[in-house]
Image (cartoon, coloured by chain):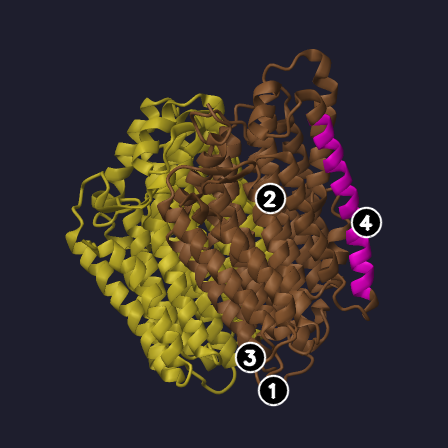
Amino acid sequence: MIGLLSIAIFLPAVLAAPTYLLGRKNAKVAKILGVGTTAIVFAISILILFVFQYGQAGFQLSESAPWAGSFGLNYKVGIDGISLPLLMIATFLSLLSAAGSSDQITFKHAEYYALFLIFETGIIGVFTSLNLILFYLFWEIVLIPMFFFIGIWGGPRRRYASLKFLIFTYSGSAVMLFGFLALYAWTGSFDYDVLVVKVPILDPKLQLVAAITTFVGFAVKLPIFPLHTWLPDAHVEAPAPVSVLLAGLLLKMGGYGLIRYNLLLFPKAVHVLWPYFTTIGLITMIYGASVALVAKDIKRMIALTSVNHMGYVLLGAFTATVAGVSGAVFQMFSHGLAVGMLFLMSGYIHDHTGTRNIDELKGLRGKMPQTVTLLFLASMAAMAVPGFANFISEYLVIQGALSVSYLFAIAIVAPALTVGYFLWMLRRVAMTPGVGPKNELRLHSILILVAFLVPLLIFGVYPPPILGSVITPTVEKWVGTIVALGAR
Amino acid sequence: MALLALTPFLSLAIFGLLATPAGFLRFRNSKLGLAPFVCILGLAVALVSTVWLGFTSSSPVSFGGLQIDLFTLFFSGVLLIVAIFVTVASLQYMRDDPNKGPFFGLLLLSTLGMIVLAASMDLILLYVGWELMSIPTYALTAFRKNDPNSNEAAMKFFVLSALSSALIVYAISLVFGITGSTALTAIASTLSTAGPDVRPFGVLAIVLFIVGFGVKMAVVPFHMWIPDAFEGAPVTIGAFLAAGAKMAAFAAAFRVFIVGISAFNVDFYSTFAIVAVVTMTVGNVAALMQKSFTRLLAYSSIAQAGYILMALATPFTTTNVPLGLAGGLFHVLNYAILKTAAFVAAAAIATKLSVRDLDSFNGLSRRMPQTSLSIAVIFLGLAGVPPLNGFFSKVMLFTGAIYSPYSWGSYLALAALINSGFSMSYYGWVIKRMYFDEPADQSRIPEPRIYMAVLWAATILIFAIGLYPDPWIRLAQSAAAALVGARGP
């Protein structure tokens, strides 16, 4: 019996082959098949929303089948309140990014959409798999299309950026795999439901080894401060729809892994490591924001906001409080949408004005008044203005951090810096007198951008549907468990 | 009926002897002659009988020192697949060579030597197999007799290889001196009770075995001949040496160390662990600096040998077949397929571009799309990206190392994983050249169908094993169990 999750995971990969074969002759067919498949997968994820039982903490829609039983490999998938929001932004952002690709990808359409669908399979698989090797498999499947996206369709420095991306993330993954294999050697299983029982009672030293090695893999993806240097290169060189995937989804893999594996599996290691990890999170937040202040390229600035905002995830997760972890999960959801919108917009602006340099974009209001309005709204979301989902998530993270230690009051510097660089950018781009003839985006591009705002505003004004009935129950249960096992 | 178990050996021997004279016969005006077809027929009969024996035979069959068990059949399956790929690719590569008869005859006889190695339970037979495998490969390496590179490669290869044979003979004589026998089971039972007075000689024999096998296994620091030989030899023979001869040397090492010497109370596992780490590190770092494709393949094969050596660094008991050993055998299968295919791709490029410089790979995906795609798949497989075959065997090997009772087990696994991550830098670099860089010459190059057939067959195998590894893992596990079981009670 094939369940909804398996259909959502494998449908894109299965349809990648016809997309490539039929799309090779006719670019339009490739676009229709590519966007159509992501739309179907999004529809399936909406269906999952109806089947999902709210307010519950365990894994749902679980499926399980032996795969290579001779070596502990089982096909196991399932979702809970932590994975559901990420699954939703995965399907939603894939749809919007595929739709937004149609005018930004100008050659090799068949290859692009086929790889896009393989990427989608990987990213959905990462958020739903409950077996370490299955998780690793999807984790690596994401990597290869991304390498080609940046290398083939990227900007002038694409070759350097793509190889740097591949080497950084693959090396990180190799170290992470060590942690996974060690867990298998110590517990005899790769299955999450078995590990969650056996790992927390392992010797704290072993937990520490596994926690640190897996942290390296997740931290490169997240990224954390000293390991982030691939990110500005990759994001800036990638075509705009791919930057949406990178910032909106690929970084979330790191955050998801940190919470699902690092935080929940190793309570005794968390007990030792949390001050270090939260401090790294804090440094990443402030560092990302400071570097974004001096960025001259608007896309680079947006890329660095990701470093800034993913720091919150690390900080929130390792406070090991309900507020902090819920905020971290919600932050991944809201940041994915906000940064996705900003990246897609930067691509449109570049296409219409020929530049991404903030100073050269002066007077954009005259050329693209509607786009500038949207840029305002997206920036407000990223600045975490109340009314947007980002406000709630960042508030929760900082609340969680403060409940652990007053020293984390220093975290307040980060949102202040964030507001600073966004307002400065807006002042230069949007608040200058408009010049030039009008050269506005087409209606369908505007609609795609507006689509990002809808969930941000809905959940910003009324978060209970996602926070109270999805994220918090799961987080409460897990945090309760790990605290009982000695995480704090 | 037991004689049927000899079919793979007899088929290779008979067809091997027939192939050379068959080279003089040809159909009407066809350039190919009969030799390649005799060769393929012999290999096909051998492979079919191997598979058939694997499914039907339950208990090992012995003919003196020659033992046909699942370990033998596993290795002969792997080596025959390599030989078939090499032969088919050589149909194209050697098309204009007048001496096809000797070429294909030597190929078959060398393959026979390899599977004798895998089957041998007696050191004398092992040595016969070793020489039967080696001597034809010298001639095959020097096959382009007017090409100075080919001759230089063969000379270098011959000298080192002869040295390794001499060391093995010396080791055998030492073992005979200690135990009074050349049969591995008898050696094991004598060594398990060996007193301290023979210990130095035993250790010396182990060192000599490691060095002797190490030359063929491409273990650092005995690897220097590999890049030169692979570059100078005909490219398809490069595949035969890298995937065939090397894996056969591993088969011999598995037999000698696990069946015979493991009974001796000497910690050779730690030695293999150190050698494994050094080998993979040197291979990976040197591969990054290469400018020629075949040399890059050579160093990558050295690195891969390091991973397989980890199987010899996992201690075991008769009751419990270690994961690392099964993983090592599984990696032998995967590596053999990947590396043969990589060399066939190199042959396709070498015949069409007549340069092996990596600069000529720039933008290759536009000029030779099928070859480029298969190189990309093969390289990702060698790097260990799931869901390709190389991933699962590496995972088994590395987990096996963590299981190890030695405290260094985890460090060995971590070193191997870091190496594996690092190796992506040169594999990814070649993919980057093929797909992202601009070609100097845009013209489309025709891709010979025979090479493409081999490459597609290999690519399908790479995906098939990777997507559904279960039967293959079981196969490797039972081969490992047969090897451990061969020690007797």
Q: What tint does the image give chain A?
A: yellow
Left or right for B153, reference A198 = right
Any mark on residue A354, and which?
3
Q: Residue at x 55, y 79 (%)?
A: A354
Left or right for B231, reference A163 = right
Q: Amino acid at mark 1?
A: Asn
Which label lies toward us, 2 or 3?
A: 2
Which is the main secondary structure of the residues drawn in magenta?
helix
Chain under disc 3? A
Q: Residue at x 31, y 28 (%)?
A: A197
User: Camera-side residue: B169 or A197?
Assistant: B169
Q: Position of residue A430 (x, y in %)?
A: 48, 71
**Tag 2 and tag 1, C-beta contact below 8 Å:** no
Which label lies toward us, 1 or 4?
A: 1
Q: Position of residue A172 (x, y in %)?
A: 54, 46
Q: CA distance from mark 2 to mark 4?
A: 21 Å
Which residues fall within the magenta stretch? B149-175
Q: CA distance from mark 2 to mark 3?
A: 67 Å
Q: CA distance from mark 1 to mark 4?
A: 41 Å
| Residue placed under numbered mark 2 in the picture | B117
Question: Dot 4: what SS?
Answer: helix
| Residue placed under numbered mark 4 in the picture | B159
| Residue placed under numbered mark 1 in the picture | B29
Which chain can be seen in brown? B
Q: Amino acid at mark 2?
A: Leu
Which label lies toward us, 2 or 4?
A: 2
Q: CA distance from mark 4 to mark 3?
A: 64 Å
Q: Position of residue A67 (x, y in %)?
A: 32, 47
